[in-house]
Amino acid sequence: MQFLTDFLQQVKMSNLYRQTVTYNPVSADHVELQDKKYLLLASNNYLGLTHDEVVRQAAIEAVQLYGTGSGGARLTTGTYPLFDELEEELARFKGTEAALVFNTGYMANLGVISALAEPGDVIFSDELNHASIIDGCRLSRAQIVVYRHADMEHLQTLLKNTVCQGKRLIITDGVFSMDGDIAPMGEIAQLAEQYGAIVVVDDAHATGVIGKNGKGTAAYFGVHTKVQVQIGTLSKALGSEGGFVAGSKELIDYIRNKARSFIFSTALAPATIAASLAALRQVKVRPELVATLWENGRYMRELLRAAHLPILAGETPIIPILVGEAETAVRLTEELKQQGIILTAIRPPTVPAGTSRLRLTVTAAHKREELAWAAEQIAAACKVGKVNIGKQVGITCRMF
Ligand SMILES: Cc1ncc(COP(=O)(O)O)c(C=O)c1O
């Protein structure tokens, strides 16, 4: 079919071609390919829990006790006791009355947003929100009003000037996935109160990462009672798979009855739920995990700043190194791979043209000496590649 050939040719010519890359994840911070070991600086496994002994053991036991699959959707035969335990613990962790697990974070955003909003409603959405939020907004068929990234004056102007007969929702990433900055939840919650809007936060990169014990963005800003809908994923800091929403009992009851991505999909396997539950318990009893993650993040940022690399300003473990053109990003990731480092090239349409980047993520599993060595290699590769060194870039980037 010609349109397939045309599309593939076009993305290849623009350095935007994507393909899956196969590695063996041998530890939380290393992967292996053909007997060569690589330092992984591209994972969202922020606390290194994918390879935690307690978490692994919980998954193994669940397979032995309950088998490999759930065999049904949650509302038919797919809910087993581990789900109830996980949902109760998630709610406690988030400081809410209840929680509901979805199969992925993507499905949680899709299902929750499209269940909450409908034609006649208005959704105010940050311009850098994740693709799954954007897709959830589109699916709802509500009016979508995009505000400039984290710009509270712009959000207020739009809230003031947009006529709405139905509900108003403000939706934001908690920690922005490609830029690594934190949404101003305090101000968002205040504006929501002033203009009668419901606040929805997607804490995919904040759960297990920011706030006391990694409780998320609302807790970080002390506004969890004013954020009605907290979405998250189990696939990043919690080292497993799945998504969730936390909020009031009534909200969860409503979502359970309305979210199509919850209702019409087979439930996650017991091993996955057991791993999430064990990981969540590890986060609660080992606060040093989150502390180490932040120490490592600060250390890496200092090293990259000292090397005058163009990193985006921020404080989280997501450290984007802005290199500009897609071709430069691809070349640098290939060069760094030769040196034994895996970094991801983030290119359009994920980020706007001209803002391609190496998205570097630090985890609690990294050792200081590994980070120091990696920073040297990255600085050397960027210098040879003539990246725009010396500029601290603080631009905002639209997500498509
Ligand atoms: C901000 C954000 N929300 C949601 C998701 C989707 O989560 P999941 O990978 O669990 O589907 C991601 C990334 O994958 C993300 O970065």
Image (cartoon, rainbow, N blue to C red):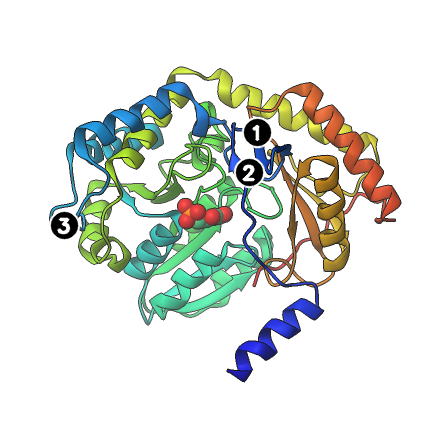
Rendered residue at 71%/31% (across/down): 301
Instruction: Name the residue that disc number 1 marks.
Output: 29
Quadrant occupied by the C terminus: bottom right
Compare residues 75 and 180 and report the one nearer the observer: 75
Crowding near the residue tagged with mark 2, few <14, some 14–19, many ≥20 C-alpha atoms within 10 Å: many
In contact (CB < 8 Å): disc 1 and disc 2? yes
Q: Nearer the viewer, mark 3 or mark 2?
A: 2
Circle 2 sits on which residue? Answer: 43
Q: Along the line of sight, which residue is nearer the eye, 365 or 166?
A: 365
Tell me where residue 343 appears, x and y as whole percent: 65, 42
Mark 1 or 2, nearer chain start: 1
Whether residue 198 is visible to the viewer of this picture, yes or no, is yes
Indicate the position of residue 340 as horizontal and vertical percent values. Answer: 70, 35
- The numbered mark at residue 387 is none
Compare marks 3 and 2 and give the one earlier in the sequence. Answer: 2
Mark 1–mark 3 distance (CA, rounded to whole Å): 37 Å
Residue located beneath label 3 in the image: 75
**Amino acid under label 3?**
Leu
Q: CA distance from mark 1 to mark 2?
A: 8 Å
* Position above or below: 6 against 392: below
Mark 1 belongs to which amino acid? Asp
Marks 3 and 2 in Cβ contact (< 8 Å): no
